[in-house]
Image (cartoon, rainbow, N blue to C red):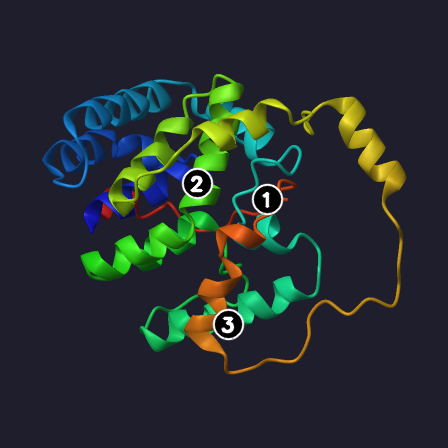
Amino acid sequence: MLLLKVISRLLDYPTAALFDAADEMVEVVIKSNELNTQTKTKLVEFIRELTARDLYDAQESYDLLFDRGRALSLLLFEHVHGESRDRGQAMVDLMGVYASKGFEVDAAQLPDYIPLYLEFLSEQDAPYIQEWLGDICHLLTMLSERLVERKNYYAVIFDSLIEVSGIAVDRAEIAESVRKEERDDTIEAIDKEWEDKEIRFDDPMTSQCSSSGMHASRKSLDPNTIQQVPIKWHDADAAEVAGL
């Protein structure tokens, strides 16, 4: 699904290649059958607004949004497992799913990085895409509501993904929960986290690998396990966006 490839690039770190491909991305959005007219219009507006900015300003804003604090982390398992050892095993399982579908991931890439996850799904058929996006709809809604609360235009990215999933989401309860959250991207909040962080030298990063594969990966994304405490990592390459 070409639309998912476009959304994957839009959610990744802004680059000159991304900006140069603005017209091609707009064309893909307009021709897509997965979004209604209103969402298409909003997504096109997002592309135009983002790519009209100074690149360095856009990159700085991106870092401040997704790298500062944990609430808007683009790492799926950060929201599900936090810093527990289960997170390492969940990533191993997800890597197994990628491998089973012939999707190659660089060893330096974290498999639960949402743009990478979307890149993988873009190569699958529609039922598979909807099923796997459906698995994370609760998380996508939470991220969207947090962006809405911050009046940030990236919310349309997550709203578009929810629409592609075909899942009817009741946002009221999630929105109410988000409104009660304390911001974790302020200087005071960041300082407090550093003060409270326990320093350990004996904590292994992950447990041993298992062959639990797709079932374990999808179970790891169960909405019932998602925490309201969402680190950000980005290295997925957007340099080839012009080759959509």
The total of numbered circles placed on residues is: 3
Residue at (89% x, 37% y) in the render? 195
Using the image, determine if residue 122 lies above or below residue 28.
Answer: below
193 left or right of 15 in image? right
Q: Mark 2 and mark 3: span between their CA atoms?
A: 21 Å
Badge 3: how crowded within 10 Å, few (<14), some, or many (20+)? Answer: many
Instruction: Indicate the secondary structure of the residue bearing disc 1.
Output: loop
Q: Mark 2 and mark 1: span between their CA atoms?
A: 15 Å
Residue at (58% x, 30% y) in the render? 177
Residue at (71% x, 60% y) in the render? 84
Front position among marks 2 and 1: 2
Which mark identifies residue 140? 2
**Going from the N terminus, do you reach mark 2 or mark 3 first?**
3
Which of the two residues, 218 or 173, is positioned nearer the viewer here?
173
Name the residue tied to disc 1.
Answer: 232
Name the residue tied to disc 3.
Answer: 93
**Going from the N terminus, do you reach mark 1 or mark 3 first?**
3
Badge 2: how crowded within 10 Å, few (<14), some, or many (20+)? Answer: many
Badge 1: how crowded within 10 Å, few (<14), some, or many (20+)? Answer: some
Using the image, determine if residue 233 lies above or below residue 170.
Answer: below
What is the quadrant of residue 96 in the picture? Answer: bottom left
Q: Given the image, on which type of amino acid does mark 3 rest?
A: Asp
Q: Position of residue 111 (x, y in %)?
A: 49, 60
182 left or right of 59 in image? right
Q: Given the image, on which type of amino acid does mark 2 rest?
A: Leu
Instruction: Indicate the secondary structure of the residue bearing disc 2.
Output: helix
